[in-house]
Every structure is written in C-alpha cells, then in structure tokens.
Image: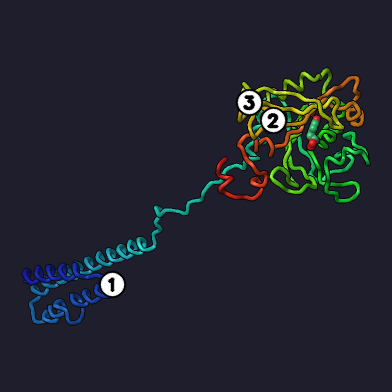
Amino acid sequence: MDNQFKLLQERLLEELAKVKTMNELHETKALFLGKKSPIQELFARMKDLSIEEKKTLGQKVNWFKNYVEEAIAKKAEALEQAQIIAQLESEAIDVSLAGIAFSLGNKHPLTKMTEEIEDIFIGMGYAIAEGPEVELDLYNFEMLNLPKGHPAREMQDSFYIDGNTLLRTHTSPVQVRTLLAAKQQPVKIICPGKVYRRDYDDATHSHQFMQIEGLVVDRGITMSDLKGTLTVLMQKMFGSSLEVRFRPSFFPFTEPSVEVDVTCFKCKGHGCSLCKNGGWIEVLGAGMVHPQVLKMSGYDPNEFQGFAFGIGIERLTMLRYGIDDIRHFYTDDLRFLKQF
Ligand code: DAH
C-alpha cells in the first residue's frame, strides 16, 4: 500500500512538471483526485476493510489528498507568477532604444555680435536701454535736431505709418526717450535694436537692419571720452594693435560729428580690396551731443555735455567675418548660419 502511494506521488510530480497552463493543471487535478482517480478507487474499496484497516488507510488517503491539493496550489501559484512575468516582459518598454536626436542650433551671427558689444559696454558700466520700433517722428527726427523739412532727413528714407509715426530709421530716438525719462540726471546707455529704411536691398543695403546706439551725458564729458571709449571698443573687438582714426563728419544731432575708421584688419593697413586700397575701414558714426538736442530734452548744455555713437551691426559683422552680402543674414540658409 505504502508503495502504491509512493508511486502515485512520483507520477503526480512527473505530471505537474509537464503542466504549462491552468487547463492542464485542472486536468491533472482530476486525474489524481477526480471520480475515476486511484484515490476514489481506494475509497470504494474501504467498505470491505476492518475498522483498523479503514483507519490507517483513511489517514493515508487523507494525507495524499492534502498532498495533491498543496502541490496543485503551489503549481497554480507558479503558473500565475510566470504569466505575470511574461506579461510584464511583453509590455516592457525598452528605454535603451536610441531616441530621435535633436540638433541644437547656434546663435545668429548678428545676435553674437550684439551680445559681444553689449558685454564690452556692460563692463564699462553702461546700462542697456530699449525703445519701440514704431516711433514718433518727434523722437526719430525732430528732437534729434531734424525738424520737418530738414534736408538731412533725406539721408534716411523712411516707412511712415501716418504723418506722425514711422518705423524708426535709426536707434537714435532712444537717446531722446532716455534723456526725457532720466529728467536731468546723467545717463550712460547703449541700445541695440532693429531699424528700417526705405532702401533697395542689395549686397550692402537692407530695408531692415540692426544698430547699437550709445549715449553718455554727464557733467564734464569731452571729446577725449568719446575717443577713448570707441578706441577701447574697437581694440577689444579687433585686437589691441589696431589703430582708430576719427574723421570730421556731419550728423544733425552731434557737433562736432565724426566718422570712426579702423586700420583694415585684412591687410593691416597696406591696402586691399576690403578697404578699397585706403588701408582704413569706416566702422561707425559718432559725435558730441548737439547742445540743441540736450536743450530739447531738458538738459542745460552749459552744465551737461555728452557723446553719442551709432554702430551698424551688420556692417561690423560683415567686416569681421569677411561676409560679402548682407542678405546672407536674413535668408536663413543653414549652410551660412552654421559657420558661426
Ligand atoms: N543715427 C545715425 C545713423 O543711423 C548713426 C549715428 C551717428 C548715431 C552719430 C549717433 C551718432 O548717436 O552720434 O546714421
């Protein structure tokens, strides 16, 4: 009898080892505990046995029943576990998969140039001012000593919105706005921004371009402050061996006015195509703030003096990198833009 149980136990383990699904497990359970199972046969035979024999056999049958049930329960648990693992594996996201690479852009050459100039001026204690691109004729021209009908307005053909408003033709109106806001206090600002002129677009002209305006107004400001400041700016940008030259010029809002040249950085002053054999390159306009401009913004020219300058950012960037056409800046060609 004991031997019989041992064989049953071995068969059970063998069968369970083959089971792969819950259905198969149910079948195995029926095989060992169901109506036609050896256990039921043993039960059926019990009625012919003595009380003693019934007792011992009963205990064994019960033990075997429990054994089968436990083994089945354990297998059921193992099957469930395996199913969960299989599901997790099938639903897993492979985070190691290579993603889509985003290529990082770089700053536009005009932005780089602007930021570089800003840094130099911030280092000299300047604040950065801003003004609107749609500007009053009053600030763009009149309060810069360019009254209506003044012939010098011709130098800056303009886009008018109406009789009193236009797209600013230069960043100089920010001088007026800054002075009015400062209310007779000293000012020291630069103002980078876009400006507009009714120009035909060609290799060196664009209807929209960028400038950086500079303005210092205080007591005791002289032409040597202007020269020193602009020389420092140019040498920081193009190297300390560079020479700076100031030529008399005319702007209605400065007196005296100057045009600032630097030694040609391509030929070092010997003469080449870039400097048209002159050895010098014109980089910006500047001057001492006209007493009339100071007066119109509420400053007493006997007490306050100032200097101002206007830098063309495109022009400076073209000179620095040897760019031959201003339109490269605006056509968004990555082959051009990626070089900076
Ligand atoms: N606003 C002038 C222009 O666009 C440039 C300029 C010249 C600005 C002299 C100044 C200056 O502040 O002093 O042509």
Is the residue under label 1 in contact with that under label 2 (CB below 8 Å)? no
Real-space Cα separation, disc 2 to disc 3, in angstroms? 12 Å
Is disc 2 placed on a helix, strand or loop? strand
N-terminal of the pair, mark 2 or mark 1, is 1
Is the residue under label 3 in contact with that under label 1 (CB below 8 Å)? no
Quarter of the rendering occupied by the N terminus: bottom left
Check disc 2 and report the residue beneath it.
281
- The 10 Å Cα crowd at callout 2, few under 14, some 14 to 19, many 20 or more, is many
Residue 169 is situated, as x and y percent measured from the top left of the image, at 81, 42
Real-space Cα separation, disc 1 to disc 3, in angstroms? 94 Å
Check disc 1 and report the residue beneath it.
22
Residue at image location 89% in from the left, 50% down from the top: 162
Is disc 3 placed on a helix, strand or loop? loop
Q: What residue type is labelled 2?
A: Ile
Rendering quarter of residue 175: top right
Check disc 3 and report the residue beneath it.
270
Q: Is residue 305 left or right of residue 45?
A: right
